[in-house]
Amino acid sequence: MKFIRISVNESKALLTRVCESHYKHQYDYEDIAAIVQWLELHDLDGIRTLLDEIKKPLQKNNTLTKHKKESKQRLILSDNSQNILHKIRIFSDLTLAKCHEDGLCFTTINNITHQETILVNLKNVSVRGYHATAWWIETEQKHLHIAKITPNQDYPIYKTIKLNKYAVNLQPYLNLIYSKNDIQSLKSYTSEHEIQGESIIQKVNTHDFNERLYQKINDGLEIKFDHYQQLTRIADLILVEASEKSRQGAGE
Amino acid sequence: MGNLNHQFEAKDIGLRTPEVVMDLKRLGSFYPYKLSFMRKLIRKLMTEKWDISLTLFNLDKDGFGEAVYEIKTPLNNFHFVVFANFLDPELRSDRVIAEAWDMTVTLRHGVFNPKDLIFLKENVPLQEKGRMTSNSVVLSRANKSSRNFDYVINELSSGKQPCIKKINEVGYLYRTTAVYGSGKFGMADWDKVKTSYADFSEPFSAEMFSCFLIRQFSLDQADHIAHQRNPKTAVKLNKSIKRYIGIGNATGLGMAPFLIKHPLLINNWIETRERVLAKVLNDTSPDKNKLASFLLLVSRAIIHLNQITTNNLTQKEININVSDDLSLIANYVTEQQDKIKKWQQVTQYVIENFSIEAQELINTVLIEIYPKEALLFEKNQEIEEIYDLVPEMKLSKLKTIIQNQYQWALKYNFKSENADAIFWYRSEEKMEPRLGERNIDKGADKEMLIGIARSIEQCYSTIQNLSPELKINNVAEFIFAHPEYRQIIRRIQTMSKTTYGEIQANLNDKDVLPIHLLRCKLSFFGVGKFDPKSRLWVRNTMFQGAPIVSDINNEYKDEWFFPVMPNIESSKGNEIH
């Protein structure tokens, strides 16, 4: 398979143009690009996720509010489009604001894919001095994913656990708890799996995340040439055809 | 300094208000100053005595071929590789969309390995179409000044020094047309440069250094060609003339989006300048020596302005007017010097009686005569360009911030034709930013988000018109309903904690003058002798008057401010090969 090495800055510029091209100014395209880049820089397949999402039709931005139920410390959201990159930050923001108001917010986002996109948001919770936990189950693989962060950390601890017992046909979901206090109630939930012998198949800590990042800063990112070409094609859609008249618009 | 929360402190220490400083016309009146990046770079390499040697100089009789300069700094080794090629004069263009150049260069980390030359030869001359390795720091190119280059060679080869007045008409032998760093085309990322190559940890210092070496190569190449042409009679270029030869630069609209997209960085640059100025005004008094230094520099600035050659009538008029203003200011200070107890008396007099250009030039002079105070701010403060949303912020608070700090943006009527007549877009030609006329030119549907004033106004208006039934209390809920404003709200929230950073202008206005943006940024780079070619691009000169490589071990006086023509008898060839 052919790869191309690009720098971190090149990836940022390219992804920003791709996101501007696809999401236009309807959404915070710079931030969506930052999410994709964060995932890619930390070996979490950001570019593949973005290319997957781009294949799906984009909802109009005024449809978000139809899928929200709210009570004290509880938020239930639905992502019926199965299209998450442009919404995950908005959902996390809502949870954070509610946590600020109520001291804790437990949010469930139903019908969601690419739940790992939440990982980048956890730092924003942590820098505000809050605790956060996110968890979801990949039913096909029978994998439980758990990410936890405490205040003032750059990265969560992210674990993937192979499940034996809880392999049920659930609709895809993502659960979040943001809290001013340590999230005691969740400890029993997560430890339950560990006690019953389910094996941790992946554990990524701050050191691992940092190493992944520094390697990219030093050497750049190796991305599939095919992905690079697809991204470039989408990015180029924001460019305007050149003409004699347009050259005057640059001072000729 | 640098990062956030200085609004209240700003008033306490006498900083000028953002309404004054961030006015586009004033920003376009800034001059290079003591802490401009070129000045900082030269101070650093002169005081640290960087060892710069020419280790490969494989040029033919016409000056075509390759050259390598090796650089030893206290921390690192770098090498600077030059490819000088024949360029059909018909193809010589300052535009970023050009495809071929007289000279292409790269600055790389490490000791030069001759084995790399083949790879570099295949890639560097291609510029944007080539790929670079992750130890490359800068990629750039330059074109000959057709007016000066041949003239200098002819004079040198016939044993004469070029006429300094003729040199002054242009001021350089080569002109750079793009200088790329920060990870472009596979090069080292800024995060890597500032940590692993700490000699260049100041923003744009690697780019500035590359321009410095392009200038050096232009001088070495000129000596070489003259000698090749006539070894018996040729003389080397006089060192004073060499110092007076800078490196030209052509800057277009590409710089403008950078300023808009990096408001925290711009805040840092401007706040530093304002703090230095405030320190000088508040903490110093004009004694006899300082008044003499002031008058000396003002008279040098007058000569400098009078020696600028430009065909741009507006710029010509500005230079004449500022020069006249400076003469009057000098007269005033001379006459009143016994009564001047505080510099504020001078600045107040200048504010009340003279143009913005003259005001900013005087501020620059004042900073220059107090190096001790200025150099307290020499070290750049690290800026993390993070614009995080504060989702829990009450919408009422956001509204108040906009009303208080973005009043300037709310004063435009974007329903009027002129206020939204211009859009910014990227051309398919090397993604060059261009301006289009709305409803006339193609591309409005692909507009760049450059018009901050318009975005603020739209966001504010949407908040104002929210139905109370929606019960939207905080920013997160507002963005849930209106995700299109997330980007601008992050910016408002972040920038509300800074003093400067937002350029207070409507960049969609029919009569917008982007040249002010360019000049602002160039002044921080240390660029002088602005020669606008239109309202959209400007030629200028870098490093004019600065030391050359052979000066590095000599005593350094940091005085190449407002360079003036050296006093040289043009026909004397005093440095024979």
Image (cartoon, coloured by chain):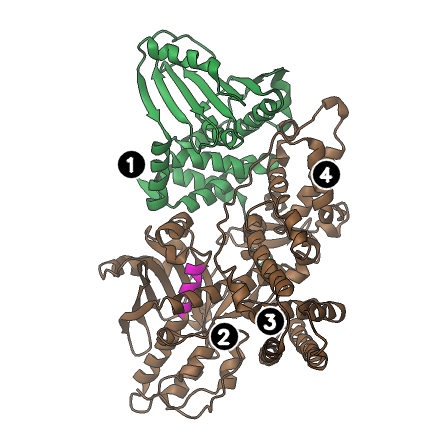
Chain colours: A green, B brown
Instruction: Give the number of the mark in front: 2 or 3.
Output: 3
Mark 3 Cα shell of 10 Å, populated few (<14), some (14-19), many (≥20): many
Q: Mark 2 points at which residue?
A: B560
**Mark 2 or mark 4: which comes first in sequence?**
4
Instruction: Give the number of the mark in front: 1 or 4.
Output: 4
Q: Mark 4 points at which residue?
A: B400
Q: Is residue B347 visible?
A: yes
- Magenta extent: B205-214
Spatial CA distance of label 1 from label 4 is 55 Å
Q: Are marks 4 and 3 in contact (CB under 8 Å)?
A: no
> Looking at the rendered structure, which numbered label has been put on residue A108?
none
Spatial CA distance of label 4 from label 3 is 39 Å
Q: Mark 3 points at which residue?
A: B365
Out of A160 and A112, give the one closest to the viewer: A160
Mark 2 Cα shell of 10 Å, populated few (<14), some (14-19), many (≥20): some
Spatial CA distance of label 2 from label 3 is 13 Å
Toward which corner of the image does residue B271 lie, by quadrant?
bottom right
Q: For mark 2, give the secondary structure.
A: loop
Out of A219 and A85, give the one closest to the viewer: A219
The kind of residue on which mark 1 rests is Met
Q: Where is residue A230 in the image (x, y as percent from the top left)?
A: 42, 38
Out of B354 and B46, give the one closest to the viewer: B46
Both marks 1 and 4 on one chain: no
Q: Residue at the spot x=43%, y=29% of the render?
A: A49
Instruction: Give the number of the mark in front: 1 or 2.
Output: 2
Q: For mark 3, give the secondary structure.
A: helix
Q: Position of residue B538 (x, y in %)?
A: 57, 66
Q: Mark 1 points at which residue?
A: A1
The kind of residue on which mark 2 rests is Trp
Q: Residue at the spot x=43%, y=57% of the render?
A: B180
Spatial CA distance of label 2 from label 4 is 47 Å
